[in-house]
Each structure stands twice: as structure tokens, then as C-alpha cells.
């Protein structure tokens, strides 16, 4: 590689935060130099602080009520499908830059498949398929020819028992290396003014390995090494580092929201269906390259659903076996898809209010005229919502502490043409330390399914030409990243953005851009998009 000279580089570290950087001590010298030689501060995330919604907010500068993505899946009535770049209904940074003849290279940014057609290169990342459509056409083959291999996902599933932890760590570091090498190759080929590379594995390692210190170190060391090589090869004038949310321990409880709402009379349960909204059932099929976006139970899974109707649930079988020390047997006799069909689930059509998926951090009202079988008349909506919020605000843990820091109407966090996609009630756990579950598993409380999970404070750092480190505010917001990046490039940002320019750079002002119309994206092939998402711990 001959090297290039970027005007602005944006490095995305999923779940990156100052507390994690401090925990790593001397393992991330490049990240530390960006933060310490420039300026860094906690970056306030959004609701919900999860990858598929937060990264689009970061790269569009608008809240999910405007861009439309509120979780891993989007809903059509009570049915669901995984989100794609086509669901992001606002202009990304690189498409606005393209209008000003500023070229971009974008690598591994979540929810960018299918890619936008811009001057430069877009190599989509997480939540897209294993072999994503790229821009320009043929780019993925070129990358693989240049660096030897490129994959979006690891070669093993999270429950794969034949891989040792050491082999899994090799997969992690390989994937991190591929991001850095692909970005450096594409920057050299396209000579862009703006570059954006995202590293996903610093998040995944916490989910899969419960925050194991040495495994986290392994992943971050390689991430830091790749950032250093990008800085050396691309010599950016200005560097920004940002994350979608933070990461930290969940020391309290798992609170099963739908179990509580059932006892309060809001949720009805059913047995024998396909389970709660999830991409989990088809993850292995998609990982293997099958062209499918839906899932229907096989004969064994249908049998489990039939057994559930007479009370023989997969959860009961598994619990009994685990109680007598037969956890391995439990895993064999109650695999994930059998557990889905063989357990109780929310009867969405006949319920009043429910949590659709835990990562939405909220409760949906089954509203007439909006939901296909809505049970709540519009004139009762406000009263039902107030009743739900009052019940949730009063919940305490077994230790007498509040479960929720905030229980608020949707309007506090979501506004725009797509606000109806969001939950009607937003539920923010106290200190983001209570793990919320949407599953119907009997008790209201249990130990957290994951001892490490998302926190609201990510990180924003700035270094280089035109950066005033003394002007870094105490707590910039996720929505501020997009207008700040554009100002650093001397390009007016959109007046529809919800954020403002972080004053480490000069504010060049806003202008009006045409409403997003969906044009410019590549044709979407909806195969393999849900691939291995449950491996990251977002599905129970």
C-alpha cells in the first residue's frame, strides 16, 4: 500500500467507553493517545442504546423517530423481520458529503446493507449478510483478493462446542484484522477525503465471555493495533473516535417485564406458537448461506409446540434436568428452536400491553387501528398507558430498590415521521444495571442472563488539525457526531439533524437537504441478514 491522506477519519468502537479503556491500562496506547493528546468525554447514547438503532442515529444525526430503526427487527403488525439499511429513512453522513463532491470509504458500519451509491466505497457490516452487496459492484471480491479473506461473521456459532476459547479468540482477532486491512486497502484505492471504519468485536466479546478480562484485552489489543496501522497509512488530518453506547457490569437482577405485566392484567399468554419476536430461529440457516428470511417449525419443533399446549413446556423439562445436575442433557433435549415453540409466549393479539423485545427497552400498547387486532380503543390509549407506567414505576427489586430509573412516554425520546415504530412506554433500568427480559419464564426476578451489558455512556474523542481540546463539553450526545464530522470537513450539515456541533471544531452551519426518498441504495437481497445475531447475546 502506498498510503493516502484522509481529511477526516471516524473510528467506531462498538461499546467503547472510558471506563473500559481505563480497565485495559496499557493495552490500548493508540486509543489512549487519541483521547489524551486530543480530548475525550463520555458520549451520551440514545434510547435504546443498542447497535442496530444507535449506529444509524450516529451516522444520520437524528433520533430513531426520524430514521425509523428502533431495534434489531422491524414489525409489520405482529410479524417481524430483521432491519436493513433500507429501513434507515434519513441521509447518512457519506451521502450528504457526496452531494458536495466529498469522497468516502465506509467499512463495517452496522445497518448499511444495502449500501448507498456514493463516490467512494461502502463495505457493509453487522446485521447484513455474510457476503454483502457492496458499492461499487465487485468490491468484496477485490478486498478478498487484496487481503486474503474478508468475513462479516466468525466461522462458529455461539453455542458451537467444538471450538476452544483459544480458537474463538483467533476468530475475533482475525475479524478485527480484516476490518483494518480492508479499510487501508480501500483508502489506498479510492483516496477518500472521509473515512469511517467500525470495529464490532469489542462489544461482542463482553456478551459472549461475560467480560472476561483477558479475552477483552486480546480483542482490544488487536483493535488498537489496527487503528495504529490505519493512522500510519492514511495519515488523517483530524481523527474522531466514537461509540454507540458503553459497556459495564449488571450486578442486580433480571426483571421479566411480560411476567409482571401478565400479573397486572395487561399480558395474555399462549402456547404452541413460533415464540417471541427474534432472528434466532433462522440464524444457522442464514450462516450457512441459505436464502431465507422467515422460519417455520420443523416436525420436532411442532411436536414441542403441541406438548406445550398440554403443559409440558421445554422450560419445565430443562429446569428439572438442570436441578438434578444434568445441564448438558437439558441443552440436548431442549435446543433453542424447540425451546421457542415449547414455551409460553405473549399472545400479542389478545394482550393490552407487552414488551416485544428486550432490546427495545419499552412496552407497546395493542392499539386499535394501528395493530391488526388492537384491543385498546384510541380513546382509552392515554389511560391505559398511564396505568402501565404507574405499575412499572412502582416495581422494586427483592432488595427494595427501584427497577427503573425512568418510565416515560415515548414522546420524551422519539419524535419524527417514524415515531410510531417505537414502544409507547420507554423503560430505562435503574443505572442500566437491571437486565430486562421479554420472556415468560415464571418468576418476575432472576439473576441477570448476562453479567455485562450496555450502558448509556459511550465515548467521543477528537484529535488533530482544527481541534480545540479545551472546548470538549462534559457530555456530548450521540446525535452530535454527524454534524461535528461534517463541520470538520467544511460541509454544511442537515438542518433536520437533532444534534449540534461539538465545539472542538468550528460550526460551519446547517442547510436544507431533500427529504430522504430511499434512492441510491443497491438492490437488497434479503438472505442471511439475521445471521448469528443471537451469538452476540441479544436473544434469549
Image (cartoon, helix red, strand yellow):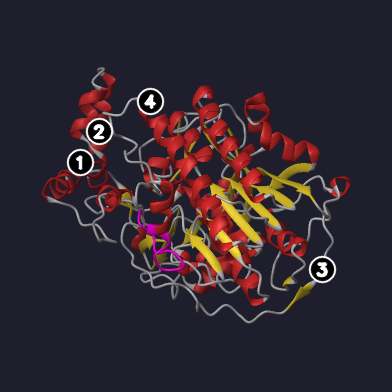
> Magenta stretch: residue 140 in it?
yes
Left or right of 136 in this view: 390 = right
Which label's residue is closer to the chain start, 4 or 2? 4
Q: Return the residue at label 2.
A: 316
Q: Mark 3 points at which residue?
A: 508
Viewer-proximal residue, 221 or 126?
221
Looking at the picture, tell me which residue is in the foreground, 415 or 217: 217
| Mark carried by residue 311 | 1
Q: How far apart are marks 3 and 1 (CA)?
A: 64 Å
Q: Give the range drawn in magenta.
A: 130-141
For numbered disc 3, what is the local secondary structure? loop
Q: Which mark is in front, 1 or 2?
A: 2
Quadrant housing residue 7: bottom right
Tag 3–tag 2 contact (CB < 8 Å): no
- Residue 229 picture quarter: top right
**Quarter occupied by the C terminus:** top left
Q: In this view, does 2 lie above or below 22?
A: below
Going from N to C along the chain, the mark reached first, 1 or 2, is 1
> Disc 4 marks which residue?
165
Q: What whole-number distance in Å separates the C-alpha atoms at marks 1 and 4?
A: 38 Å
Amino acid at each position: 500500500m502506498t498510503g493516502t491522506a484522509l481529511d477526516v477519519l471516524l473510528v467506531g468502537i462498538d461499546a467503547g467507553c472510558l471506563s473500559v479503556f481505563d480497565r485495559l491500562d496499557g493495552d490500548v496506547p493508540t486509543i489512549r493517545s487519541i483521547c489524551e493528546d486530543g480530548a475525550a468525554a463520555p458520549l451520551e447514547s440514545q434510547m435504546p442504546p443498542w447497535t442496530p438503532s444507535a449506529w444509524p442515529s450516529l451516522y444520520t444525526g437524528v433520533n430513531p423517530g426520524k430514521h425509523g430503526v428502533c431495534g434489531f427487527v422491524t414489525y409489520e403488525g405482529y410479524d417481524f423481520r430483521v432491519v436493513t439499511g433500507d429501513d434507515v429513512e434519513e441521509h447518512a453522513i457519506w451521502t450528504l458529503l457526496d452531494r458536495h463532491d466529498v469522497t468516502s470509504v465506509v467499512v463495517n458500519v452496522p445497518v448499511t446493507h444495502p449500501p448507498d451509491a456514493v463516490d467512494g466505497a461502502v463495505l457493509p457490516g453487522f446485521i447484513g449478510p455474510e457476503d454483502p452487496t457492496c458499492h461499487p459492484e465487485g468490491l468484496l471480491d477485490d478486498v478478498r483478493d487484496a487481503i486474503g479473506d474478508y468475513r462479516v461473521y466468525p466461522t462458529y456459532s455461539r453455542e458451537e462446542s467444538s471450538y476452544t476459547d483459544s480458537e474463538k479468540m483467533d476468530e475475533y482477532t482475525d475479524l478485527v484484522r480484516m476490518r483494518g486491512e480492508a479499510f487501508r486497502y480501500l483508502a489506498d484505492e479510492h483516496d477518500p477525503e472521509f473515512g469511517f471504519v467500525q470495529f464490532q468485536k469489542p462489544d461482542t466479546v463482553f456478551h459472549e465471555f461475560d467480560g472476561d478480562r483477558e479475552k477483552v484485552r486480546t480483542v482490544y489489543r488487536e483493535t488498537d493495533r489496527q487503528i495504529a496501522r490505519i493512522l500510519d497509512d492514511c495519515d488523517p488530518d483530524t481523527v474522531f473516535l466514537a461509540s454507540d453506547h458503553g459497556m459495564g457490569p449488571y450486578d442486580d437482577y433480571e426483571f421479566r417485564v411480560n411476567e409482571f405485566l401478565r400479573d397486572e392484567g395487561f399480558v395474555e399468554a399462549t402456547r404452541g406458537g413460533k415464540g417471541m419476536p427474534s432472528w434466532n430461529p433462522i440464524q444457522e440457516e442464514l450462516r450457512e448461506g441459505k436464502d431465507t428470511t422467515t422460519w417455520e417449525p420443523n416436525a420436532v419443533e411442532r411436536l414441542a409446540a403441541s406438548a406445550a399446549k398440554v403443559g409440558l413446556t421445554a422450560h419445565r423439562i430443562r429446569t428439572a434436568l438442570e436441578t438434578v445436575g444434568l445441564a448438558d442433557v437439558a441443552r440436548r433435549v431442549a435446543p433453542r428452536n424447540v425451546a421457542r415453540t415449547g414455551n409460553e409466549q405473549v399472545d400479542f393479539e389478545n394482550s393490552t400491553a407487552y414488551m416485544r423485545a428486550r432490546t427495545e427497552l419499552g412496552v407497546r400498547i395493542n392499539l386499535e387501528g394501528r395493530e391488526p387486532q388492537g384491543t385498546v380503543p384510541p380513546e382509552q390509549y392515554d389511560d391505559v398507558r398511564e396505568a402501565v407506567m404507574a405499575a412499572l414505576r412502582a416495581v422494586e427489586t427483592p432488595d427494595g430498590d427501584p427497577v427503573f430509573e425512568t418510565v416515560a412516554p415515548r414522546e420524551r425520546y422519539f419524535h419524527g415521521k417514524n415515531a410510531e415504530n417505537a414502544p409507547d412506554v420507554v423503560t430505562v433500568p435503574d443505572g442500566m444495571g437491571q437486565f430486562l427480559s421479554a420472556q415468560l419464564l415464571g418468576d418476575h426476578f432472576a439473576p441477570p442472563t448476562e453479567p455485562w451489558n450496555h450502558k448509556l455512556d459511550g465515548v467521543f474523542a477528537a484529535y488533530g488539525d482544527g481541534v480545540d481540546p479545551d472546548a470538549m463539553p462534559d457530555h456530548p450526545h450521540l446525535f452530535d457526531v454527524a454534524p461535528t464530522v461534517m463541520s470538520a470537513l467544511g460541509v454544511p450539515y442537515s438542518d433536520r439533524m437533532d444534534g449540534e456541533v461539538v465545539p472542538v471544531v468550528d460550526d460551519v452551519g446547517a442547510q436544507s437537504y431533500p427529504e430522504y426518498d430511499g434512492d441510491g441504495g443497491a438492490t437488497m437481497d434479503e438472505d442471511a441478514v439475521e445471521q448469528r445475531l443471537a451469538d452476540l447475546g441479544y436473544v434469549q
